[in-house]
Image (tube, rainbow, N blue to C red):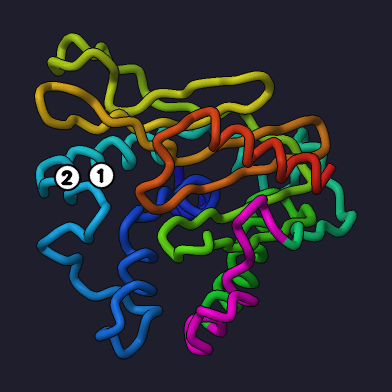
Amino acid sequence: MGARGASMLATVWGVPDVTLWRTAVADPTNPDPAIPPFPPTQPEPGRRAGRSPWLVGVAGVVVGALVAGIPLLLTRSSGGGLGVSHEALHAPANLNDFTPMTSNPKMPPATKKRTETAETMSAKNLSEAYGGAATTVRKYIDPELGDFVTLEAIRATSPKPYVPYVDAATIGFAKPLQEVDTIGRTSCVVQNVPGSGGKQDTHVQICERTSSHLTVRLRFDGEGWDSLEDAVALTERAWSALS
């Protein structure tokens, strides 16, 4: 796969750091909330303790493997076979309690401006990755400014999410560090993070539903995405608003 293909795959499936956005907006000492500072060494009240560096490293390796393994179908520049359409898409005004970052009164003006620019450029790059299909990208935030979700919608079909196979027993865990779980017509990439006592904590990273003419994908950031059912329900809410 050439450099162009790798760039497109990263655009479509790159998995963002789950702590950077939250740190950026929550730290009043940060002069520019759009540029996250170093993560705090102590957990915030009511929040779970941060993950250890080696766990973050393991997760990074797995995420890299995921990006490298996405089918080449997504890189077809002509859009052939993707069911591409140019009919405009309009992101919903909210996703349950989540509202757009660009209209949230608690967001600093500089953050709103940067978010708007990022949404515009991401939609452009996403359209190019899908052969010119109509797209929309919107970032949402919860009322407490702790959890985030990024909506990506494309007037085209997509393959089901994929992660490389790992025999969990060979790495000493009950579940692989990453897997794809499906409920109904929605498939999600789930990270099983090693925790205390040999247990694994679940974190939903991405959920997607697709048809012959539409793909709706949500990317989840923050510490509140440990319920697969909740993530799927929010994805279905976005799908209903866009289909």
Q: Nearer the viewer, residue 64 or 208?
A: 208
Does 149 appear above or below 201?
below
Residue 168: image quadrant is: top left
Q: Which residue is mark 1?
A: 60
Spot the residue most to the right. 87
Label for residue 101? none
Q: Is residue 109 magenta?
A: yes
Q: CA distance from mark 1 to mark 2?
A: 5 Å
Identify the residue at horizontal 56%, vertical 55% (top origin). Answer: 150
Identify the residue at horizontal 73%, vertical 57% (top origin). Answer: 135
Q: Look at the numbered disc 2 and give the secondary structure of its residue.
A: helix
Q: Quadrant of the N terminus?
A: top left
Q: Nearer the viewer, residue 217 or 102?
A: 102
Crowd band around label 2 with a 10 angstrom C-alpha radius: few (<14), some (14–19), many (20+): few
Amino acid type at mark 1: Gly
Q: Which residues are magenta?
A: 94-113
- Look at the numbered discs 1 and 2 and tell me whether their residues touch, using CB distance below 8 Å: yes
Amino acid type at mark 2: Gly
Identify the residue at horizontal 20%, vertical 65% (top origin). Answer: 39
Q: Position of residue 182 (x, y in %)?
A: 56, 20
